[in-house]
Image: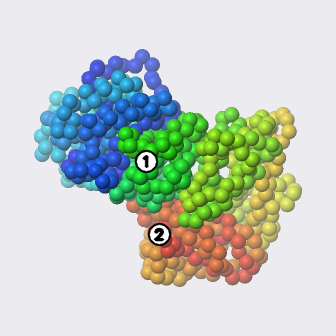
Amino acid sequence: MAARALGALAGLAVVAGLLTAPVAAAEEPQLIAQKPYMGWSSWSLESTNYPGVNPTGTASWLTEQHVLQQADVLAAKFKQHGYTYVNIDAGWANSFDEYARPVVNPATFPDGMEYVADYVHRKGLKLGSYLAVGLDVKAYNDGNSPIAGTTGCHTRDLVYPDLRKTNGWDSAYKIDFANPCAQSYVDSLARLLAGWGVDFLKLDGVGPGSFKGGDDHTNTADVEAWHRAIAKTGRPMEFVVSWALSHRQAGVWKANTNGWRVDTDVECYCDTLVTWNASVKQRWNDVVQWIPDAGPGHWNNLDSLDVGSGKMDGLTEAERQSYMTLWAIEAAPLYLGDDLTRLDDYGVKLLTNDEVIALDQAGIPAKPVSQTTDQQVWYNRNADGSYTVALFNLAAVPARVTADLAQLGIAGPVQIRDLWAHKDVGDTTADLPVHGSRLFRVTPRDRNALAAPAVVHGTAATGTSVSLAWDASKGAQSYDVYANGRKVAGTGGSTVTVTGLKPSTSYDFTVVANQRSGRPSAPSRKISLTTPAADGPRTYEAENGSPQGGATVYDCACSGGKKVGYLGGSGYVVLPTVTAAKAGTYLMQLSYVDGDSSRTGIVTVNGTSFPLPVAGSNDDDWNTPQTVTVPVYLQAGANTVQVGNQAGYVYDVDKITV
């Protein structure tokens, strides 16, 4: 993460599983990361200013003694619940050997990493290591260090002639993989880790991501090289990359790693481990674009789970429960960041709730029904036909939240179990405290009945057509689409474009799922949409509107070559007047630019406001637009649309299309 660069050795993380046993080639390939990993990691403690934790400066907590203490507690109290990894993060090395490989700091790990790894493995736990991407500047040694296992390669052969910098901190030289010596160097590091008996490697500061992009910060070649190097060792080793990876390279991450951090550090770098605003709450927005990418072999990593000690964590009990609820329903790795010797009873109860852990380990990430409100419902359908349903109140005031089961495709009698309370309840409505949550397993009485299509929504519209999408019904062979009660389309997939509609006309759409034999599903929950005028949809350029409060027009590779940026705080933009021939709910496509993690704009239509978070690129690309589509209610005639957010930064706005 952003603050993990520790002097010249920013990239040297602790090789937490360092055994000296020889590496034996596996007779058969061992499947890695079939479930999200669980364990403990050191960085939350290394990064905090909590009194007494880092007495001599950042990361001074990291010592052999402290790591062994954590391993003792993990084995005694948490291994039985599935927590097995002991991951030592940045700061374990203080120099490089004659082959440009990291050397363990003897002052903090006096018995050496072989001893630490041996200790951890004897307890039935696994060992995790950390490195930063690139060739550390101190490892370069004026280009004179030979590469282990080669006869003619030196560090001067690894880098570009201009010694360009890379990674999230610019703390290393970018490696030129056009030279075969570069792969040999990565191979030498992988052999070192495998020889120690490492079970896990986190490669940090990887781009595009870590809020940097461009050629110098594109490390896809490094990631591919590490994938090859680990495979060559013959040792099963889980491999994850960090931090705030760009979704634009999701295909590379999926093909070469077992997981990726979707966001910046969860730690606040303050007097606690985290705070709600810095930066737990951001995960509800940032994970969304990654949800379809998670699955066996590669998972969305939301960072450390710091919910074990209220005083040290810096969170309320409601926030701690919501924190773990999101991690669990997203099938994210569950790795604890607290001092395991100082947990409170509530924290232990959260972390050892086997019903909640089972949801995480089932590996089916949930998705939000809508994020245009702070009262959110997230859901998924489980392999056994039950549903996970989570309620969140992300607002700063208490609120009631209700899951509409029909909208989720659930019909008929159901059993509802509250997984945190360990009891059955009568409905999926809850009065939630500030930042509170509830977590249910909803089981239809007839699990074999064909479920209705869930969360039907519009994706595009013209004067004579509307495009719809929905979450597929398990076992469905086809779908029938109805407009105002009349069948208007059929499809074998979960998207359709309904044609032959009339301009400026309102339609109620429902979808019914069909199976090869047996009864069709109940109809989906109805959605109402109005088609635009015959010449629609119409585009409204932001630069032709009215930027206010410091908002500024900038050049970009956008529609019209312009966008409005510097939004947020006092800055906002009023779009050109939007006209509608008839009052109704229309589809509005927002074209925006966000090179950061997900930012949230407050969209105001005729005085009615709603939050609109979007997918960020995490690569500092403020030139390339993306789009998101939302329903908005327009009155007949002139309408005013405004985008801003007094409470935070906003994405740049290119245009809207209605």
Q: Amino acid at mark 1?
A: Ser
- How far, Cα to Cα, is label 2 from label 1? 29 Å
Residue that mark 1 sits on = 309
Left or right, residue 539 beside residue 185: right
Frontmost residue, 599 versus 191: 599
Is disc 1 surrounded by few (<14), some (14 to 19) or many (20+) residues within 10 Å?
many
**Does 256 sit above or below residue 389?**
above
Work out whether residue 417 can be spotted: yes
Frontmost residue, 246 versus 285: 285
**Does 603 sit above or below residue 427?**
below
> Which is in the foreground here, disc 2 or disc 1?
1
Left or right, residue 15 beside residue 27: left
Work out whether residue 194 can be spotted: no
Picture quadrant of residue 538: bottom right
The residue located at (26%, 23%) in the rendering is 20
Residue that mark 2 sits on = 648
Is disc 2 surrounded by few (<14), some (14 to 19) or many (20+) residues within 10 Å?
some
Q: Secondary structure at mark 1?
A: loop
Q: Amino acid at mark 2?
A: Gly
Q: Secondary structure at mark 2?
A: loop
The residue located at (16%, 32%) in the rendering is 152
Frontmost residue, 413 versus 572: 413
Picture quadrant of residue 606: bottom right
The residue located at (85%, 35%) in the rendering is 518
**Does 362 sit above or below residue 504?**
above
Frontmost residue, 146 versus 101: 101
